Each structure stands twice: as C-alpha cells, then as structure tokens.
Image: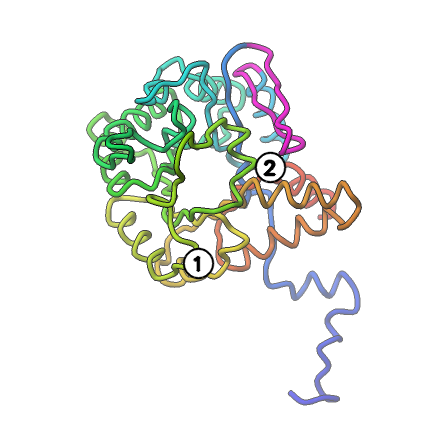
C-alpha cells in the first residue's frame, strides 16, 4: 500500500464516507448516568464543582428518571447523601434511606430504566472512610458484613444491579453469598474491580460529602503506577462472582481498560469520573476548548479502549448530541 496508489485521505473527504468506515461508534445505550439521592422532598441542590448536577430528593429523582429514559440512556447509578452519619455507617442499609427511597421512585416512574446502586460506606460514615474503623484503619472483614447488608437493602428496594466500590478484599463474594441466600440470585454485581486512588475524585467528594476526616484511601484503593495488580484484582472479583468489572477512573487508565477487556473477555465498565467532567466544564466555560467536541472525543476514546459501558456525568449531553447528529 504505497503512495500514490494508496491515499488514506480518500475515505476522509466528507462526513458520509467517514461514517461508513468509522471503527468505533458511541451510542446512548453505551451510557450510564450517576445521580445523587438525598433526603426530604422537592430538593434539587446544585453541586458547585459539577455544573448541571444536583442532589435530588426521591420526587425529583423520579422526574429525572423520565428525562433520562427519553434520551435513550438505559441505566442510572445511584449514590446516597443521608440525613445523619455515624461511625458504623448504619444509614447505608436503612430501608428508608435516600438510595432505597430513590430506587422505588425511579422504578415507579420509569420501570424500564436499569437502576444500579453504588455499594459503599463512605457517604454514610462520620469519618468518611469506606468501612468500619478499628485501630485507626479500615477493618476489611468487619466492613464486609456492612456492605452485604447494604447491597441486600438495595435489592429489597428494587435495584436491578449492585456495584460495590469500597475496594475491600472479598466483598464481591460476601455480597454474592448474601444476595443468593435471600432470594436475589438474579441480581448482577458490577464490581469496581480496578479502582485507583486518584486525584480525579475531588468534585465527587463534594457532591457526596464523602471526604475522609483523617488520612486517605491509599491503603485500600489501587496505586496509580500498577497495571498487573489491576488484572489480579479483576480476576479475583470474577472468581467471587462479579458479572461486570469496572475500571475507575477512565481517561487516565485507558491502558487498563484495554488490558482488562483483552485478558478477561468480560463485560467492562469504565467510570469517567467527576474530575474528568469538571475539568472539561471549567475549560469550556472559559472558552478555552469546544466542550462538546472534547466530551465526545473523551467518551469515544474510552469505548475505543474496550469499555462496553461508560458511567459518565456527560450522559445526558452526549446522548442528546448523538441523537441530534444521527
């Protein structure tokens, strides 16, 4: 294939040709929208570092669900902001907690929408860590019982899928065993299998009120320099019963997404996190970048790397733009 017999530009000269040979397509069905559930009624509290996102009470969550479904987005992921927190994170499995109430509201408003719930303790603990503290550290095995109770409460409320994000060893197995023992063997687990200790989570911690009051999460989230370890984490979660494995964050870990997809063949989710969203929004507001183009390029790169589904705060905007240009 030597020039001039072969010219690469021939198939790039107009949009019709480019569409015909495009290798990777992004669709609304690839997207999952994270939403923040809180207590009360008629609550729609703006999240300062994440323009366009809000803490929503169950009634407003129901309204949002209808809009999401109309855009062709198949699923939402729910995070909770409780009224009260304690050291043991008991609010995580409260049957009348914000996530449990939001699940019911979303399923009533839009039954076809897939409801995935984040399973973790950080939003519910007074110290902001992802589990129960013992001797100034998160006790792995004590936390497993808490996570299993939380996942079960979500399933009882009507969740379609649970997604443990805590990074405790053995939590997928503990959750799978509890769900199966209680008649929820058909509830899938989307495991945050390779979740890195990342600086990209900052805006989320404002949104969920989940910043640690002491120390950090480096003792249980992954070191950004490690790739082989990510595969070990992923395979362990698969052995314990994970149905979908996730890489988080997405943009700075495209190589991990690719390795996980190629080496496991499992359905792979990628979480394009709050910092990725907020950086684009801030630069776009200042006029430094074309926000829509950067958004679509980022999401396309994540899918191209091997992600089957993308959890993204851009889901609404991206879905609308895809439909508009179809």
Q: Does dot 1 land on a helix, a strand or a loop?
A: helix
Which numbered dot is residue 280?
A: none
Q: Which of the 4 quarters of the picture holds residue 131?
A: top left
Give the total number of marks visible in the rendering: 2
Q: Closer to the camera, 312 or 220?
A: 220
Measured as percent of width and height from the top left, residue 205 is found at 51, 33
Is residue 243 in sight in this rendering?
no
Quick one: quadrant of the N terminus? Answer: bottom right
Compared to 319, does 144 lie above or below? above
Compared to 37, does 96 lie above or below? above
Circle 2 residue:
72
Q: Closer to the camera, 252 or 37?
A: 252
Q: Does dot 2 land on a helix, a strand or a loop?
A: loop
Is residue 106 in sight in this rendering?
yes
Compared to 195, does 73 lie above or below? above
What residue is drawn where x is 54% and y is 30%?
A: 206
Q: Closer to the camera, 202 or 80?
A: 202
Measured as percent of width and height from the top left, residue 156 is found at 33, 21
What residue is drawn where x is 51% and y is 45%?
A: 199
Q: Closer to the camera, 129 or 56?
A: 129
What residue is drawn where x is 67% and y is 39%?
A: 317
For residue 96, side relative to residue 324 (left or right): left
Along the polypeptide, which appears first: circle 2 or circle 1?
A: 2
Magenta segment = 41-59
Q: Disc 2 to disc 1, how far (Cα)?
A: 28 Å
Circle 1 residue:
256
For residue 102, side relative to residue 288 (left or right): left
Counting other residues with Cα less than 10 Å from the Cα at mark 2, is it few (<14), some (14-19), or many (20 or more)?
some
Compared to 223, does 107 lie above or below? above
What residue is drawn where x is 47% and y is 61%?
A: 255
């Amino acid at each position: 294939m030597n020039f001039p017999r072969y010219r690469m530009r021939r198939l790039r000269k107009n949009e019709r040709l480019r569409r015909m040979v495009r290798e990777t397509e992004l669709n609304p069905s690839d997207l999952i929208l994270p939403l923040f559930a809180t207590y009360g009624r008629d609550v729609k509290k703006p999240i300062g570092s994440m323009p366009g996102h809000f803490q929503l009470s169950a009634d407003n969550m129901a309204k949002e669900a209808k809009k999401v479904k109309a855009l062709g987005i198949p699923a939402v992921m729910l995070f909770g902001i409780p009224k009260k927190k304690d050291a043991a994170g008991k609010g995580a499995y409260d049957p009348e907690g914000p996530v449990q109430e939001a699940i019911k509201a979303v399923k009533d408003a839009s039954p076809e929408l897939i409801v995935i719930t984040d399973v973790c303790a950080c939003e519910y603990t007074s110290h902001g860590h992802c589990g129960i503290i013992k001797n100034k550290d998160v006790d792995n095995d004590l936390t497993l019982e808490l996570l299993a109770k939380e996942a079960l409460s979500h399933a009882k409320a009507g969740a379609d899928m649970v997604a443990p994000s805590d990074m405790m060893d053995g939590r997928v197995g503990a959750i799978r065993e509890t769900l199966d023992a209680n008649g929820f063997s058909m509830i899938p687990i989307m495991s945050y299998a390779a979740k890195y200790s990342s600086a990209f989570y900052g805006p989320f911690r404002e949104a969920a009120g989940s910043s640690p009051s002491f120390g950090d999460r480096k003792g249980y989230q992954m070191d950004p320099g490690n790739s082989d370890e990510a595969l070990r984490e992923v395979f362990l979660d698969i052995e314990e019963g994970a149905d979908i494995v996730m890489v988080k964050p997405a943009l700075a870990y495209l190589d991990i997404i690719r390795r996980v997809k190629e080496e496991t063949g499992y359905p792979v989710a990628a979480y394009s996190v709050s910092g990725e969203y907020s950086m684009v929004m801030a630069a776009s507001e200042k006029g430094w970048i074309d926000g829509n183009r950067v958004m679509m390029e980022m999401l396309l790169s994540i899918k191209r790397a091997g992600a089957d589904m993308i959890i993204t705060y851009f889901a609404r905007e991206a879905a609308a733009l895809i439909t508009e240009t179809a």
